[in-house]
Amino acid sequence: MKSKIKELISAEKIQQRVAELGREIGAAYQGREITVICVLKGSFIFCADLVRHIPNPVKCEFISCSSYGNAKTSSGEVKLALDLSTPLDGKDIVIVEDIVDPGLTLKYIRELFAVRHPKSIACCALLQKPEALKVDVKVEFTGFKIGNEFVVGYGLDYAQNYRELPYIGVLGADQV
Ligand code: IMP
Ligand code: MG
């Protein structure tokens, strides 16, 4: 039996905002093909929903990155576990992140891809913790700005748990 997680953003609100983000991205690229890069594992649900709301032709690519391990605070060290299998030359790429916390992962990914000569790079993050933004990194499309609490659900985990929740919740002290 799963313990109840305090809801922060409901499934309905997430679905509404994801649909809007898809339209915002579509408008920004005016019908051009977009290469969407899903940052595993945390973005898998968000990215799957988002691409279905982007009106443009979309190609989906996946990378795997982690800076957290099984902890609730960032280790500060970003690891690339899985790289792209295709070149980025001349492509409009949108990096899809679950959450930008201190922003280390996104900064690392942007720098990694910038040298591969894409036509453009943008990031779409479902969540952003503005107070935690230690690194100067651009997020062109943001779903929700939240406080500094540790959240789970809709792809986000704590020690690999809770990714399957349809809403975003905050873990209680007895749940960690
Ligand atoms: P950053 O690189 O420090 O900005 O951290 C980004 C990554 O850390 C995200 O892609 C998440 O996997 C993870 N992360 C940061 N904050 C949270 C949180 O509140 N809940 C779950 N994972 C988080
Ligand atoms: Mg994680």
Image: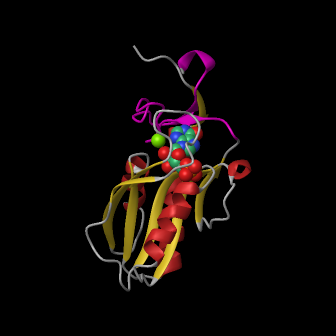
Q: Residue at x 56, y 34 (%)?
A: 72
**Would residue 150 be counted in the magenta stretch?**
yes
Tally of numbered discs:
0
Name the side, left or right, on which 62 lies relative to 111: left
User: In the rendered view, would you say 107 is above or below 154?
Assistant: below
Residue 75 visible in the displayed image: yes
Ligand 1 placement by image quarter = top right
Q: Quadrant of residue 134?
A: bottom right
Query: In the image, what residue occupies the spot 52% across and 56% down?
Result: 105
Q: Nearer the viewer, residue 57 or 89?
A: 89
In the visual, does 24 lie left or right of 62? right
Residue shown at 50% from the left, 47% from the top:
67
Magenta region: which residues?
Answer: 148-175
Residue 5 percent location from the top left of the image? 54, 24
Residue at figure coordinates x 44%, y 79% from the top left: 115
Hey, which quadrant is residue 50 in on the image?
A: bottom left
- Residue lying farthest right? 131
Q: Main secondary structure of the magenta part?
A: loop
